[in-house]
């Protein structure tokens, strides 16, 4: 039946469009996670260097340690959110590929 064939083509086109959107979203999220990790690592390293610097006062080193601990916790929360969004995008990808809801 030719009408069924047209419908199948339309459905396939719609699914492939959705898949392309989801893959683009996943790519963007993965890149943002990589950039975020690089930035966080740099900030954390600077604070660690200050913490370990014997020429700094105890007060400066303690302050750097406190900031480091707060930054690590903040960064972990941000990364958790980013990975949650990536997982959701991957689930959308599976749905787009399989057509399941």
Image: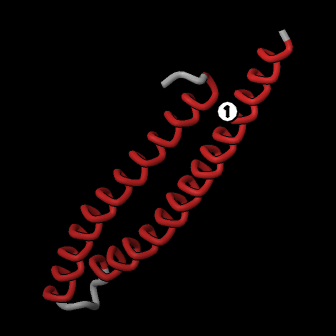
Q: Position of residue 57 (x, y in %)?
A: 19, 91
Between residue 17 and residue 82, name the one nearer to us.
Answer: 17
Q: Element at badge 1? A: helix
Q: Going by the picture, which residue comes out furthest to the right? A: 2
Badge 1, how many Cα within 10 Å: few under 14, some, many 20+? some
Task: Give left or right: position of 60 versus 55.
Answer: left
Numbered marks: total: 1
* Residue at the image position 67 percent from the left and 32 percent from the top: 15
Give the residue at mark 1. 15
Q: Position of residue 31 (x, y in %)?
A: 59, 59
Q: Give the vertical position of 34 relative to 12 (above or below).
A: below
Between residue 12 and residue 32, name the one nearer to us.
Answer: 12
Q: Quadrant of residue 19?
A: top right
Judging from the image, the colouring scheme is secondary structure
Q: Give the vertical position of 13 relative to 42 (above or below).
A: above
Q: Give the vertical position of 101 relative to 44 (above or below).
A: above
Q: Quadrant of the N terminus?
A: top right
Q: Quadrant of residue 93?
A: top right
* Residue at the image position 69 percent from the left and 35 percent from the top: 14
Task: Give left or right: position of 16 versus 58.
Answer: right
* Residue at the image position 47 percent from the left and 72 percent from the top: 39
Q: Position of residue 69 (x, y in %)?
A: 22, 67
* Residue at the image position 69 percent from the left and 44 percent from the top: 20
Q: Position of residue 75 (x, y in %)?
A: 33, 63
Task: Give left or right: position of 65 versus 34.
Answer: left
Task: Give left or right: position of 39 versus 30.
Answer: left
């Amino acid at each position: 039946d030719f009408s069924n064939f047209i419908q199948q083509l339309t459905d396939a086109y719609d699914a492939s469009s959705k898949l392309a959107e989801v893959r683009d979203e996943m790519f963007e999220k993965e890149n943002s996670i990589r950039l975020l990790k690089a930035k966080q690592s740099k900030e954390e390293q600077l604070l660690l260097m200050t913490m370990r610097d014997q020429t700094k006062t105890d007060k400066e080193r303690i302050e750097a340690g406190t900031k480091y601990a707060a930054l690590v916790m903040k960064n972990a929360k941000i990364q958790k959110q980013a990975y949650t969004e990536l997982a959701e995008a991957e689930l959308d990808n599976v749905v787009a590929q399989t057509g399941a809801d």
